[in-house]
Amino acid sequence: MSNLLLAQEGLVDPVRSIAYSSFAPELLLVGVALFLMLLTVAEENRSAVAIPAGVLAGAVGVWLITSGLLLPGAVVVAVAAAVVALPFAFEDEPALISAWLAALSALGALVLTGWQWAEHFSVDGGLGVARLDLGGSLAFDGIALFTRITVYATVVLAIPVGYGYLKDRGIHRPEFEQLMLLSAVGMTILGAAADLITAFIAVETLSLALYVMAGLARRDRRSQEAAIKYFVMGAVASALLLYGMALLYIATGSVEIAAIAEGLGLVTAPGRVAYFGLALVTVGLGFKVALVPFHLWTPDVYQGAPTNVTAFMAAATKAAGFAFILRMYLLGFGRLVDAWVPVLAVLAAITMILGAVVALVQSDVKRILAYSSLAHAGYAAIGVAAGGLDGLSSTLWYLLTYAVTVVGAFACVIAIERRRKGEVALVDLRGLGKRSPALAGLFTLALLSLAGIPPTAGFQGKLAVFQAGVSAGLEWLVVVGVLSSVIAAFFYLRIMAMMFLEEPEPDAPEPNVSTGLSLGLAASAAAVVVLGVLPATLLTLADNAATLAR
Amino acid sequence: MTFLAQAGADGAATASALPEQILFWVMAVIGIGAGLAMVSMRNIVHSALMLVINFAAIAVLYLALQSSFLGIVQIIVYAGAIMILFLFVIMLLGVDRDDLLVEIRPAHRVGAALVALVIVAASVFSFVGAMTSEESRCGALAPATVSAESIPCVGLDDQLEENDGPVGLLARRLFTRYTWPFEISALLLVVATIGAIVLGRRRDPADEAARRALEPEPEPTGPPDLPPSAEPSPEVS
Amino acid sequence: MPIGYYFIVAAIMFSIGLAGVLIRRNAIVLFMCVELMLNSVNLTLAGAARMWGNADGQVFVFFVIVVAAAEVVVGLALIVNVFFRRGTLDIDAPNLLRG
Amino acid sequence: MGILSYTLLVPLVGAAIVGALDSEDTDRIRWAGLATSIVAFVVSIVMLLQFDIGDGGFQLQENLRWIPTLGATYHLGVDGISLVLVLLTTFLTPLVLIASWDDVKERLKGYIVSFLVLEAAVIGVFLSLDLLLFYIWWEVMLVPMYLIIGIWGGKNRRYAATKFFLYTLLGGLLMLVGVLWIYGQTGTFSYLDAVNLDIAVEAQRWLFWAFLVAFAVKVPVFPVHTWLPDAHTEAPTGGSVILAGVLLKMGGYGMLRYSLPLFPEATQEAVPVVFTLSVIGILYGAIVAMMQKDIKKLVAYSSVSHMGFVVLGIFALNTVGVSAGVVQMINHGLSTGALFLLVGFLYERRHTRMINAFGGLAKQTPVYAGLFLVVALSSIALPGLNGFVGEFPILLGTFAVNRWAGVLAAFGAVLAALYLLWAYQRMFHGPVEGADNENTSDLKPREIAVMVPLIVLIVGIGIYPKPLYDAVEPSVDRLLGPVGLVEAAETGTVAPVGQE
Amino acid sequence: MDNVLLLAAESKGLVTETYSATGAVEFAWLILALPLVGFLVTILYGKRLGEPTAAYLPTAMSTGAFVVSLAIWFQLLGEEASHRRFLVPLFDWIKVGGFEARWELLIDPLTAVMLLVVTGVGSLIHLYSIGYMHGDERFSHFFAYLNLFMLSMLMLVMGSSLLTLFVGWEGVGLSSYLLIGFWFEKREYATAAKKAFITNRVGDVSFMIAMFLAVGTFGTLDFFRADGTGIAQVAPEVLAIGGGTALALGLLLLGGAAAKSAQIPLYVWLPDAMAGPTPVSALIHAATMVTAGVYLVARTSPIFVQNIDAMAVVAWIGVATALLAALIAIKQDDIKKILAYSTVSQLGYMFVGVGAGGYTEGIFHLVTHAFFKGLLFLAAGSVMHALANEANVWKMGGLRKVMPITFWTSAVAWLAISGVPPFAGFWSKDQVLVIAYEHGFRAIWAIGVLVAVLTAFYMSRWFFLIFLGESRVESHQHPHESPLTMTLPLMLLAVASAFGGMLINLNHFEGPLARWLGGYVAPVQEEMIVHGPLGEGALIAISIVAAVVGITLAYLVYLRGPARERITGPVAEVMANKFYVDELYEAIFVKLGGRMADFMTWFDANVVDGLVNGSATVTSAVAGRVRRTQTGLVRSYVAGIAMGAVALVVVFLAQVR
């Protein structure tokens, strides 16, 4: 705060006081992404790039360690070691280098996030200190950190899951991992964006990467269609969002969310402009997290995009989008709660019901999961509408539980998708419980988690948002959520029934479970169970994450 | 251009509103007209040209708004780079393809017009009064009481003076307060570059290898998610 | 000139862009309409910057231009790709994903 | 970790062990499953021995931190009511496993694992003293039961399983909303805190119904009973037994444990409605049962009727009625469980359950017929058998507070005799017609061995139910304290006692 | 049965004291334990023991119970008249809240009488059955069931509370069900068994409601308690004379009794119950079980005497049943059906007795009826045994010569039931009628006399058609006298039917039974006793005349000339068809009830479940419709966003204050 004021006064040059530690994970990822770019360019002369880069990174790591930053230094050193080692380890399989390195760096980012947390927050109890860095653009607070956890965890899970799949479909490209890392960086920046400009650029960064990733399967018309649809609609939505932001700037004279919050509280604020802006921002953000009626792209894009991209989109984009929604609404529009809470509640209600209902009549598993993700956006919106610290932490928590679950679910789809190349009809699952009980079991676990049946992560998530909703007096909304859950359970049950209650077709192809996939799947399943049964630690984190830097 | 910029920049300072008014109305009409033309013209190249005109009009309006640097950037980047890119693609794909407009059903036009009207009405509702009164004239004396009904226009004169002109003004802000967005906009450009590479590369080795290894991608003829026979009927019925 | 007029003009342009998105089927024109929308927002931002007497709006415009450029790069690449795949620029060409 | 945790964990550990076995090794899977359930039974007997019968409070409590941020704890405790229900569960599970020794041939491992998880979940429901923990067990139960019906069930099993799942889930989630509301008031999920909470009457009304829907679905109370006949009919024998024997009891238990003490005023207001529904359920269930062509469906509808008595007793809100309601839950578990077992034995032989496919079986299968008759009579509430010692006090307690409800419900006894004896006549009496009936073999020793403990308990409880009532009554008295109604059965008057 | 032994002076007023068991009474539990053991052993191992070994244990057990009963009786005789009520606690049963029920036996003179009747007749019938059931494939089961019946019936008469009585009450219903349906291979037999059980269940509900009310009124169901708070002990204080509670309790108990004792309107099961083996008919459906209702009313007499209306209803039900059954009996052709309706009719007499306040008289008739009706049934069984289960009386006749013992014993029973002095039936029936007359129920008395004429008539018809006249036995039949195990009980019962009445209660108010039961059934209110114009002598004379008239008429109709049915015509047709009561019930309960049940089943499947499934259908339909908005067209998607934006803008701007 003081930093911000000083910066505005022009007394402190923020450039010289850059707090690198507040975006250390992003630095790491961007560095790795750039390195991977170089590696791609280097083609056969990988060692020529890798060794200097590794040495450089190692030197940075050692410097960090010697200057007392033990953990981040260790992470950097480890990544540096990987940078040097991996090109030699996978000389014949260059694609594996980038996959491994990306996954490792995401893991490293996760560790760095933990380090950030430990440095600046107390893990077990008490709200941490929230602050704004970089002149007020980068929030260093609970939401930002928790979003990092969710996004990076998603990346850690999604990269091994996706690698084999892309290879199998013949659409793996070295740029894929770079795009995913950079997109993840965009997402975390969105989660930490404290002013509208940063937010807008972050939105565009992650969106552009996703457009490209959605269209990765160039020979698959569905993938192309998904990409172009996503892009066109995303562009329109961005424009609407941008216009909304501009209107807020008109109304308050500032692009900083905290300042907007104050500006909107003034009696002199032009209310009409503010409300106009609020409406358009809602449209734009609603589009990003797929709230009805701005959801229309979701089923098509989720179905058409390569499945691992869908998983990443469903899990991480939602997390980032909701993180910004939380910041924007709870902080920025904190004075206008009377206006937006009912609207958001209604949107949440429609979203939940529509997502669950329309999924009933789908026959493509990816599409079913897409519609279910709609319903889940609705549940998360309950937390936002509930507001307060409860709503804040419950939404974050919900998004994490949803992320680990949905990646697992899509990983199972990937395993089954093997030969169908981009589509998995419900009937393809017939008898999976017999053919491949372990896979069917894990899929069931994921589905139960999506349905919110204890003792899974999904239940804990739903519990949290419902609890926030009830304590905020939105009982009706929670009841709608309940109804939607029941309807949704119906189609989850249909999938389960297909797997366990039907006989397998004789010539059904074996599911394809690559090493990476099984790793990711196992990790996701473990996370689902652990978060479901013993959520205490991470739930405490989510609770502590209920801080907003202003 | 320089003159206009100067006029715009100084207009407020000298409180001579007339040039700005003329400038505004002319450019507004041109911009809106070009926009309308762009939307409704059949020939895609014509549309693109209309857009260029619109961009130019907007650039002029930037000048009037004491943002001459932006006006120049607008001309260079938009009209100069982006629109060229558009035209390039149009040429690449063939120019005779815009016969699609005729297929639009009138209902769509009416609907679109209604949407547009609502947005315009909302903006009129929002701005008229609060920002169209005389107090909102930039450079005018600040009213005694600031209220939501009339927002004064502060103007950028002080800022421009303090920062040695529009470029300095923008640069100061950009490289101090907005370092972080500046950095991540670099990221954005990297992403765009990678994306363009991925999308633009005609053929890559991995692709080829995969194609050799596997049978060709299936080309479903009908919508794959709606097999007519497999239409599911929910169990509870 | 009261600043509100700039805003209204920008809003009108924005509406035109939006309407264009709604009625045009050609992907490129559609994309141009989006550009029109972005530009009208830029105009709004620049106006607001003058109104409030701070440069944040101008900085915003600057970044929007950057974003627009990036978007155009990716967008046009996509459009070209899709055109080669589907052979048409009609955004509503027969589609596989619906329902 | 005390004895309660062991009771809860034994089936789970057993499930894990069974799950680790090779799925081809069916013998070992069967024996492991059976051994687990027997160990669980023994552990629960140890629990019984450690239990102080005279004390109505929660005993052997275990309270561990679980989710501190939510104030949710791993809090177990047992009182008389849960004690007997846990014993019923651990008692029935081994019997079920023995009974379905041969009839499950496919995917046996999954079957055994499902049963053991189900057992653990049910025990968890009965032992939890934390609302969240309770809810979790409540929902966990759904999945194994869904699979049991869905995989090993009859022809229409998908429909039945889905219906069961959705019905219960809807009820459960509404309850969850209620739980969360209470959580909002206390800030913890502790049951004991919730009991002490003084909820405003307005709120009580909503909460009461939110909870009641969950319990009513489970019991089931008319008109949310239609999942039951389907589920029962389609479930495999073992599933039906556990469903009827134990799962339905969760509803009654929920009413006792939550509805009454948490929402005393709302409960009292709701008594007329609940009475009406219960009486309708009793009569309606019986009448519909009468017209069933499928013996299993008949038994299923008879469950609707019988559980109506349980609800009636519980909402009599006096010691007699409520205690008898608990006892009747045990009785219903034993006799309806036994009936389903018997129906299952017959189905195994004949692969049909249509009543008119049978005839004159008493001649061919005298032992079977005899056992069936004893169990049916228990269901009819013949004095001297267990059904009576529950049903009579229930009616007594009901009559004391609402004469018409008592009188109408008593006619359920006639109808019970009507549908069961009619079915009995059609199946066992008359001439032996058709080769199928002539070739039906009598019970095998294994099957008799399953039935003997049940028959012993049916007769034993009928003649000497005192231990059961002694165990239940102190807890019931304690429970009724907040409801503010402790009724003196002697005078037939209902006077508020012990109000603050 | 020596008059000298029944010496205790009768005391006016009810004896309310109870005493702890001593001596033989302490072993009263043996009376239950013996048949229980017999039942268990025989049902489990009877098949292996085979015939006739399987019958020995049950018969011995029954006899053993008789011996214990005798011992108890003797002990009671030795006690002072006011010291003859003992409580024998066994163990606790249900104890919850304020409600308490114990397994406890009540031994008092009333019980002792019933014990002797039940065990005595029961043992004889066990003996008889050894011969009668010879060769049945479920021989051992039969005896097991008989012992189960003994167990239940003895529980019924010894139960110390309404609830323990109810246990026996239901137990006898069950054994009756098992025994009626003993030959379940025949559908109608199984149906008869079910009908008996269900009809009794209807009565049981009434009984149960009576118990609920009793708990509410008295706080207990015990008849007598050591602390003096039993129902019978406190009834005079708790129940107002002529009060509604007494009436309600009385009518509800009557409802139970009417079912068990086959009174209007629940008598329909008893004639059908003759489907069971004849010994069963004799034991259960003539001698013992069906009299349980009479016993119940006598046992709860302290309640009934508090309300004359309740008593009147009992008496009127009794007499109406007696008349109806007698009329039906006239036109029946089945040897056992005639006896069955006769039983219903005689039970009506007993109800008249207990309803009119003549508890002693009612019990007296119960005892003598057990003798002669048991005898009649056993004789009928003997006849059927001889004729290969032929039951139509028109296919008999002239059996006097081939079956002398059966003939002579039947003759005794015929005269006894017809009310010819000095046979047992005369005394008891006459005393019932006298008490009805003297307690002011003169109309009932008049009808009772008419029924006496009818009784003599139809029983004579029965007797004449079977034993006298020409033989109409079908040619292939070779009637023969029954074995000793069957005739011995006949002879013993014949002796009892001949002399039992005189021995037990020759003198109406001073007889041994009257003194024996005095103080142990409730005395009626003094004001009830209204002496009419006719003295006791005149009443006796009228009874005798009635019997003579009936027999004479029967002689004229059936014995003069060739045997053929001379009573014909529409009225006779109605009588032969049992006044179409079965058909009426069928129409109401089976047809109408069935239709209602069908409707409810339909309702359940289509309305209740239909709503559930309907909601699913509607949801799917909505989903299908909503799904169509997902056109896949980008412009329509953008339009969706635009519409949403417009809506939100409008909504938000509408909120501007």
Image: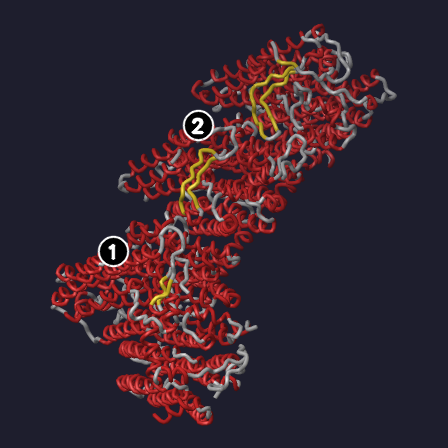
Mark 2 — residue?
A: D49
Q: Which chain's residue wears label 1?
A: A
Q: Is residue E548 above or below residue A37?
A: above
Within 10 angstroms of label 2, few (less than 14), some, or many (20 or more) residues?
few
Which quadrant does the N terminus of chain B fall into? bottom left
Q: Which chain's residue wears label 2?
A: D
Q: Dot 1: what SS?
A: helix
Task: Report the number of numbered marks.
Answer: 2
Q: Is residue E411 left or right of residue D474?
A: right
Between E344 and E36, the residue placed more toward the observer is E36
- The quarter of the picture where residue B104 lies is bottom left
At horizontal 32% and vertical 79% (from top left) the residue drawn is B171
Between C85 and A480, the residue placed more toward the observer is A480
Q: Is residue B96 left or right of residue D390?
A: left
Q: Is residue D346 above or below residue E443?
A: below
Mark 1 — residue?
A: A71
Q: Please give the label number shown on residue E565.
A: none
At horizontal 67% and vertical 7% (from top left) the residue drawn is E78
Q: Dot 2: what SS?
A: helix
> How far across and down, in percent of the image, does residue D360 sit?
48, 34
Q: Label 1 to label 2, Cα distance in Å?
A: 55 Å
Can residue A423 be seen in this snapshot? yes
Q: Is residue D226 above or below residue E124?
A: below
Tag 2: residue type?
Answer: Leu
